[in-house]
Amino acid sequence: MVAGEGAGRGQRSRRELTTIAINCFSLYGFQGTSIDRIAREAGVTKGAIYYHFRDKEALLAAAVEDRVREFEDRVQRACEGAGPADALRRIAEVCIHHAKSGDYPRFTIKLMVESIGTNDRVSAQLRDMMRRFRAFVRNIISSGQERGVFSGEIDAKAAAASYTSGVLGAEIQYYQDPERMSLEQTVGVYLEQLLSGLEQNPGRTDETDNKDDNEDDNEDRE
């Protein structure tokens, strides 16, 4: 809905308010964002915000929940039908696209730092998100080990933590210096190094693995 059309800015939905709040929190942080600022940006009264949310912290928690759910859904969809190595590449692509989509990605990074020791609720939300992300990546790596694509000697949990750190660290560098830091190249180099270390047989791809499976099936039928 375009501002000023239809029902007007004075009747923003809950989802619209969390979206506007995310933009404010991204730019100014939690401490630098007031209900007055959000209401002003949304073109509503403070009462309209309090109708949906008890206070600023409740609005922030709802905004975090919306953003995390959206990101996790994108990751899940991207990995559908992909082999282990391709799934790790696709997750990286989602993270890169997400990081370059505007101010929203900074929202999570900024809050991760700001909420430590100051906002237990948001800190717990972000911690749980990172745990789910690492678990998701760990399960992909474990699946690769079960299929013989990745080495069984690798600690899947540690590899998942390394993957998360590598992608997140690259994002932070990009936010700080987007003109001189190529996010795609940095993540790409890291990812290929990680995959090289994970592979049971260097040079073997998901496609090769699938081809071998098909050949084995054909031999069984002969």
Image (cartoon, rainbow, N blue to C red):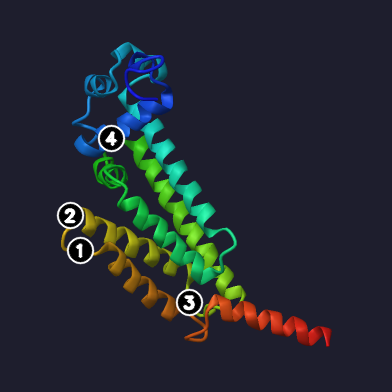
Residue type at tag 3: Ile
The label nearer to you, 1 versus 2, is 1
Position of residue 161 measured from the top left corner of the image (x, y, whole percent): 40, 63
**In this view of the protein, which residue sits in the foreground, 213 or 167?**
213
Residue type at tag 4: Asn
Q: Is residue 141 left or right of residue 168?
A: right
**Vertical arrangement, residue 59 with respect to residue 27, above or below:** above
Location of residue 184 (image quadrant): bottom left
Q: Dot 2, how many residues are within 10 Å of its Cα: few (below 14), some (14-19), or many (20+)?
A: few
Position of residue 34 measured from the top left corner of the image (x, y, whole percent): 22, 24
The label nearer to you, 3 versus 4, is 4
Q: Which residue is mark 4?
A: 23
Q: Is residue 187 left or right of residue 80?
A: left
Q: Residue at x 25, y 24 (%)?
A: 41
Q: Which residue is mark 2?
A: 176
Query: If you read the primary sequence from the N terminus, does the residue marked by circle 2 or circle 4 appear first?
Result: 4
Residue type at tag 1: Met
Residue type at tag 2: Gln
Q: Dot 3, how many residues are within 10 Å of its Cα: few (below 14), some (14-19), or many (20+)?
A: some
Q: Which residue is mark 1?
A: 181
Distance between the Cα atoms at labels 1 and 4?
A: 24 Å
Position of residue 117 measured from the top left corner of the image (x, y, whole percent): 27, 41
Q: Is residue 17 left or right of residue 215?
A: left
**In this view of the protein, which residue sits in the foreground, 139 or 93?**
93
Query: If you read the primary sequence from the N terminus, does the residue marked by circle 3 or circle 1 appear first?
Result: 3
**Vertical arrangement, residue 63 with respect to residue 1, above or below:** below
